[in-house]
Image (cartoon, rainbow, N blue to C red):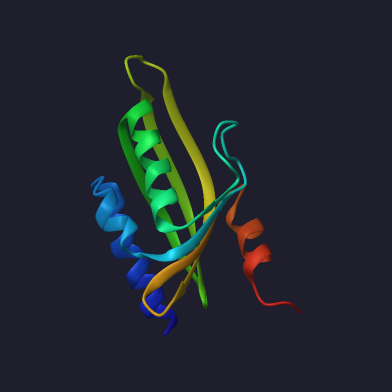
Amino acid sequence: MSQENVDFLRRAVELGSETDLEAMAARYHPDAELRDLQHLPDIPEVLRGRAAILATWERWLEALDDWTLEVNEYIDADPWVVCDVRWRATGKGSTVSIDWRVAEAYEVKDGFIVRQIAGFPNVAAALKAVGPEE
């Protein structure tokens, strides 16, 4: 099942890279939770529900141009998939660029992303947080 989770997430990220936010959001469970460890001051650390997640992405797109998402690696940590991610954008109406590299973890169940934790400093920290306890 874990390779299925990786493939599922890869397809979801492709949708996000095409900025088809509604199609990407449909991959989230209606009651999904997104926790952003490096959230902006005006955005809550924890978003609950697909609608709240989609609304936040839309806010980002209102403020940013040339939005791109690149996943350098997908790591199976069943039921989690940990990704080494690079986000790039330019502030709308400016030349200020954003180039942000983080790790993100996605918990996949029954064909939906049920939990996402974004903003880990690196893959090792993400794997430590979501990996099996020893």
The front one of 83 and 25 is 25
The quarter holding residue 73 reads bottom left
Mark yes or no: residue 64 visible.
Answer: no
Q: Residue at x 30, y 50 (%)?
A: 16
The front one of 85 and 91 is 91
Q: Residue at x 31, y 62 (%)?
A: 26
Residue lying furthest right in this view? 134
Please provide percent x and percent y for residue 116.
Answer: 51, 59
Q: 102 left or right of 13?
A: right
Assign the C terminus to one quadrant of the image: bottom right
Residue lying furthest bottom in this view? 1
- Residue 89 position (above or below residue 96): below
Please provide percent x and percent y for residue 90.
Answer: 36, 25
Mark yes or no: residue 134 visible.
Answer: yes
- Residue 41 position (above or below residue 105): above
Q: 103 left or right of 109?
A: right
- Residue 10 position (above or below residue 121): below
- Residue 133 position (above or below residue 52): below
Q: Residue at x 47, y 63 (%)?
A: 32
Please provide percent x and percent y for residue 68.
Answer: 32, 40
Q: Residue at x 37, y 31 (%)?
A: 89
Assign the N terminus to one quadrant of the image: bottom left
Q: 85 left or right of 125?
A: left
Please provide percent x and percent y for residue 76.
Answer: 49, 73
The quarter holding residue 59 reads top left
Total count of labels: 0
